[in-house]
Image (cartoon, helix red, strand yellow):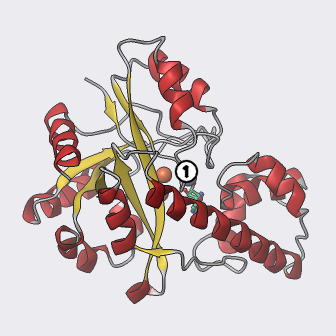
């Protein structure tokens, strides 16, 4: 059974439309897949409709909220939510505000890039995002398109990466707020890619008190030792070891494909039960 609980579409910074993504999932014989776009649930209806043609594939409604952590320099902490009710008004209010902040932050990053000698056209970045949640990958692509850099990855090297010269952080919502929103929308909250959070060791023990029920341990970009360490942490703090590929269809050589990693069925079943009990 292939379960993958983390992937993106063109409704945020992924490069496949929800329909194209579903075709890849069906082709790769994935059984359960969660679409978890950054700060948007807008791809879910399309993905679920497209999956109707593939009875063996189940699409789980998901979200990846860009939260920040005030005690950690407002560094980015991504919170996944599963089985959220996308009609929930409070959830949509929070997502709309976050997307608005992404626009303002994008403009500020363009100011920084211009000062650093890489002027870009904001309208072009918006076009590349095509109405979706704007993120650093869209800016990175605009830079490559303008011929400033050879690859998308280069844009993150010292420029757009966290703490990079053009980087602008987010204030948006706290992890606690994001967790509350997910829970009140009937969802189950899971900490995304913990090893990307600098102070994860002090954060993880506090997750249960925030109503967060799991962490990503089966994460395709973490090696076996890293995953083992996360399984240990999950067990110790009573968190579900979830995970997935975080597929964006970026097309880089070593990108993990959908279905390449994820939790076993019993973990997924517990996650679904916890969401229902929320
Ligand atoms: P944003 O949502 O604007 O903060 O951008 C975050 C997204 O940028 C992540 O989901 C990744 O897709 C991408 N990203 C972040 N850091 C890097 C990096 N160092 N190299 C390549 N892509 C990155
Ligand atoms: Zn992304
Ligand atoms: Fe993320
Ligand atoms: Fe992601």
The residue singled out by tag 1 in the image is: 40
Q: Nearer the viewer, residue 176 or 246?
A: 176
* Residue 191 seen in this snapshot: no
Q: Position of residue 274 (x, y in %)?
A: 17, 48
Q: Residue at x 47, y 19 (%)?
A: 51
Q: Residue at x 37, y 47 (%)?
A: 84
Q: Position of residue 271 (x, y in %)?
A: 21, 44
Up the image or down, 194 lies above or below 16; here it is below
Q: Nearer the viewer, residue 275 or 269?
A: 275
SS category of the residue bearing label 1: loop
Q: Nearer the viewer, residue 274 or 237?
A: 274
The mark tally for this picture is 1
Up the image or down, 278 lies above or below 45; here it is below
Q: Residues within 10 Å of mark 1 (few under 14, many from 20)?
A: many
- Taking 277 as reference, is 46 left or right? right
Residue at the extreme front of the image, as rendered: 89
- Taking 144 as reference, is 170 left or right? left
Quadrant of the rendered image containing residue 29: top left
- Taking 130 as reference, is 80 left or right? left
- Taking 219 as reference, is 231 left or right? left
Quarter containing the N terminus:
top left
* Residue 234 seen in this snapshot: yes
Q: Residue at x 33, y 42 (%)?
A: 83
Q: Position of residue 20 (x, y in %)?
A: 60, 25
Up the image or down, 80 lies above or below 263; here it is below
Q: Position of residue 245 (x, y in %)?
A: 42, 41
Q: Nearer the viewer, residue 22 or 232?
A: 22
Quadrant of the rendered image containing residue 5: top left
Q: Is the distance from the Cβ of mark 1 to the nearest ligand 2 atom less than 8 Å?
A: no
Q: Residue at x 43, y 51 (%)?
A: 88
């Amino acid at each position: 059974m292939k379960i993958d609980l983390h992937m993106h579409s063109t409704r945020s910074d992924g490069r496949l439309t929800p329909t194209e993504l579903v075709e890849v999932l069906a082709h790769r014989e994935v059984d359960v897949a969660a679409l978890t776009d950054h700060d948007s649930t807008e791809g879910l209806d399309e993905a679920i409709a497209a999956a109707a043609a593939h009875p063996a594939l189940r699409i789980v409604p998901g979200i990846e909220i860009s939260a920040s952590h005030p005690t950690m320099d407002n560094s980015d902490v991504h919170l996944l939510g599963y089985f959220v009710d996308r009609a929930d008004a409070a959830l949509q209010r929070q997502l709309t505000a976050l997307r608005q902040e992404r626009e303002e932050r994008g403009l500020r990053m363009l100011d920084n890039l211009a000062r650093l000698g890489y002027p870009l056209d904001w309208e072009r970045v918006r076009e590349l995002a095509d109405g979706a949640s704007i993120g650093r990958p869209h800016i990175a692509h605009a830079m490559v398109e303008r011929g400033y850099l050879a690859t998308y990855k280069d844009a993150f090297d010292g420029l757009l990466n966290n703490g990079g010269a053009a980087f602008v952080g987010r204030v948006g919502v706290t992890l606690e707020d994001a967790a509350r929103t997910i829970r009140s929308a009937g969802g189950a909250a899971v900490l995304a890619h913990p090893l990307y959070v600098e102070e994860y060791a002090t954060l993880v023990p506090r997750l249960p008190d925030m109503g967060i029920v799991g962490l990503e341990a089966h994460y395709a970009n973490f090696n076996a030792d890293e995953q083992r360490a996360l399984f240990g942490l999950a067990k110790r703090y009573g968190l579900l070891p979830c995970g997935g590929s975080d597929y964006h269809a970026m097309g880089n050589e070593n990108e993990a494909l959908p279905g390449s990693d994820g939790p076993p069925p019993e973990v997924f079943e517990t996650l679904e039960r916890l969401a229902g009990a929320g």
